[in-house]
């Protein structure tokens, strides 16, 4: 049957041994199912339900197998030849928002298409079978870039303002000082790996290349924006990079791009645009910026928002690494999700760029995700506060930066809803199992309405100076109660206990010299 070296493992356990005469028919067999799928494509032979059920797995296994690049192995060459023939005969699904795919066959073809393209002997001949709509776009040549880099604890994407069309190859000249030092070139901003049953784009559409020589060749079957990726904890000034050829993208950078330059740049042919401000980069479909006439106003909005994010977090206004938003056709989970970059659906792009609606209706979801990126394990109590404390930034930015009252910023923040949640929580026995999201946020809102935002800033600042934190919610909640009490000069043990927190006698003793907050809001609920 053969052996392969793979990166994955199976769980330990007792497995039924296959009956040799039935193994191919009753279970999954890589080479046999690949042969059957090839016959299905080339000769129209029907697949059984059992075979169709395993097509998605076959696609994943084909991709893994191809990554071995064992071109001197006859079996590898046979598999590669079979897959290449399948793709040439069937083509690859032209998946898009308007043309989603959901069949096992299409999943398989999307999984293997990019991998075959990377390792087949003649990728240029295969490309027209994979990408049907691939217009020639205007390019620039020998595009010179210069970077000043000072990264913190995480890698950082450095925008180039260039895009590669699907299958387009280019060379990049790299300074010798960063060769084999952990730097990479990335093609594509859509870094979420998709596992959904219905796909509106291929599962994986970005590529990375290690900077292992002074001249490297890069490409991506799906195309994408070009980035230089700096590793953590590096500091370099005047880093000069030259890109042999690329498609110009609409790219605005605060303090660099003039109003006159933007009027031309916004018409650049690439389908992706980037707006880089002091502390954040917004990556959106180019159509969303074609008519944007005042990028300076958008820059001012986001510079104010990011200063607000920093103020509440008690960190310097200049972020160690600029945050990033990418608005695209499909993401791995949720409407948006935090991380680097923050991922959002493409319909969110307009709101990120609209200064007027931001100042009247707000942008709660975007600030919520930025709040997630500020959460710290030392004062987080998962899973209770995972979707709660990030909203401290949503409330703060809307009120202190955008001038939108919390009750207007989100329907859940109206006073009637807040009172109702607190009352129901008390009536339910103050059980921490029900203390999460909006219910938990009310705890923090009551603290804020009594002690103000400065108290939170001082508490977060105090945590910056601490070390050796406890690693369980029980102890962390006691530390938080103690820290907040010491910060505001009032014993809050009774308040937190009224919310069902497991306040220990030791914590009460530490706070006994402080005046108690005896008229806290939870008193009204009994």
Image: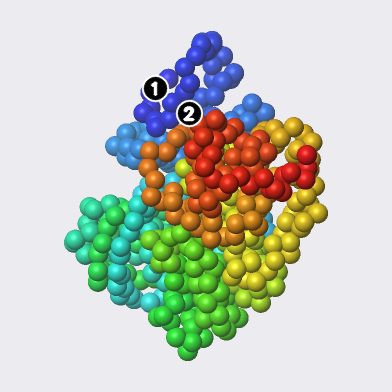
**Quadrant of residue 516 in the image?**
top right
Residue denoted by label 1? 2
Residue denoted by label 2? 31
- The first of marks 1 and 2 along the sequence is 1
**Quadrant of residue 172 in the image?**
bottom left
Judged left or right of residue 171, residue 458 is right
**Quadrant of residue 96 in the image?**
bottom right
Judged left or right of residue 198, residue 277 is left
Does residue 461 appear in this view? yes
Residue 84, placed above or below residue 128: above
In front here: 473 or 338? 473
For this orientation, the residue located farthest to the left is 176
Q: Position of residue 486 (x, y in %)?
A: 50, 48
In front here: 400 or 55? 400
Does residue 164 appear in this view? no
Q: Position of residue 217 (x, y in %)?
A: 31, 60
Q: Are marks 1 and 2 in contact (CB under 8 Å)?
A: yes
Packing grade of label 1 (10 A; few <14, some 14-19, many >=20) is few
Question: Which secondary structure, mark 1?
Answer: loop
């Amino acid at each position: 049957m053969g052996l392969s070296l793979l990166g994955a493992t199976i769980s330990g356990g007792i497995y039924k041994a296959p009956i040799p005469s039935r193994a191919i028919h009753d279970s999954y067999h890589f080479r046999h199912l690949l042969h059957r799928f090839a016959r299905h494509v080339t000769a129209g032979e029907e697949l059984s339900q059992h075979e169709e059920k395993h097509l998605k797995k076959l696609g994943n296994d084909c991709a893994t197998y191809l990554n071995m690049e064992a071109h001197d192995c006859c079996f590898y060459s046979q598999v590669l030849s079979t897959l290449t023939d399948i793709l040439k005969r069937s083509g690859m699904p032209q998946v898009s928002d308007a043309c989603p795919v959901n069949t096992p066959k299409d999943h398989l073809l999307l999984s293997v298409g990019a991998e075959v393209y990377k390792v087949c002997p003649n990728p240029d001949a295969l490309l027209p079978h994979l990408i049907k709509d691939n217009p020639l776009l205007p390019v620039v040549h020998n595009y010179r870039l210069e970077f000043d880099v000072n990264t913190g604890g995480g890698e950082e994407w450095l925008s180039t303002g260039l895009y590669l069309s699907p299958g387009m190859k280019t060379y990049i000249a790299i300074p010798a000082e960063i060769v084999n030092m952990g730097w990479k070139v990335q093609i594509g901003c859509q870094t979420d790996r998709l596992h959904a049953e219905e796909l509106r784009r291929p599962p994986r559409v970005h590529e990375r290349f290690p900077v292992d020589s002074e001249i490297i060749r890069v490409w991506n079957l799906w195309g994408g924006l070009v980035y230089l990726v700096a590793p953590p904890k590096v500091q370099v000034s005047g880093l000069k990079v030259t890109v042999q050829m690329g498609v110009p993208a609409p790219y605005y950078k605060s303090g660099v791009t003039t109003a006159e330059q933007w009027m031309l740049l916004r018409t650049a042919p690439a389908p992706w645009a980037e707006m880089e401000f002091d502390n954040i980069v917004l990556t959106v479909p180019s159509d969303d910026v074609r008519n944007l006439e005042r990028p300076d106003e958008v820059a001012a909005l986001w510079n104010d928002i990011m200063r607000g994010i920093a103020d509440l977090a008690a960190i310097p206004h200049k972020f160690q690494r600029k945050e990033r938003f990418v608005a695209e056709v499909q993401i791995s989970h949720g409407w948006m999700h935090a991380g680097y970059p923050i991922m959002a659906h493409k319909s969110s792009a307009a709101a990120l760029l609209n200064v007027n609606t931001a100042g009247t209706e707000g942008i709660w979801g975007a600030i919520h995700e930025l709040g997630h990126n500020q959460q710290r394990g030392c004062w987080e109590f998962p899973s209770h506060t995972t979707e709660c404390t990030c909203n401290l930034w949503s409330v703060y930015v809307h009120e202190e930066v955008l001038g939108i009252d919390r009750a207007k910023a989100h329907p859940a923040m109206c006073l009637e809803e807040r009172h109702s949640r607190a009352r129901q929580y008390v009536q339910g026995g103050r059980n921490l199992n029900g203390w999460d999201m909006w219910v938990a946020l009310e705890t923090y809102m009551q603290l804020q309405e009594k002690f103000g935002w400065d108290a939170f800033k001082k508490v977060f600042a105090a945590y910056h100076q601490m070390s050796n934190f406890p690693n369980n919610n029980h102890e962390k909640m006691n530390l938080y109660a103690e820290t907040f009490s010491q910060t505001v000069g009032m014993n809050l043990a009774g308040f937190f206990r009224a919310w069902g927190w497991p306040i220990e006698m030791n914590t009460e003793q530490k706070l006994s010299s402080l005046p108690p907050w005896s008229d806290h809001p939870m008193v009204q609920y009994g």
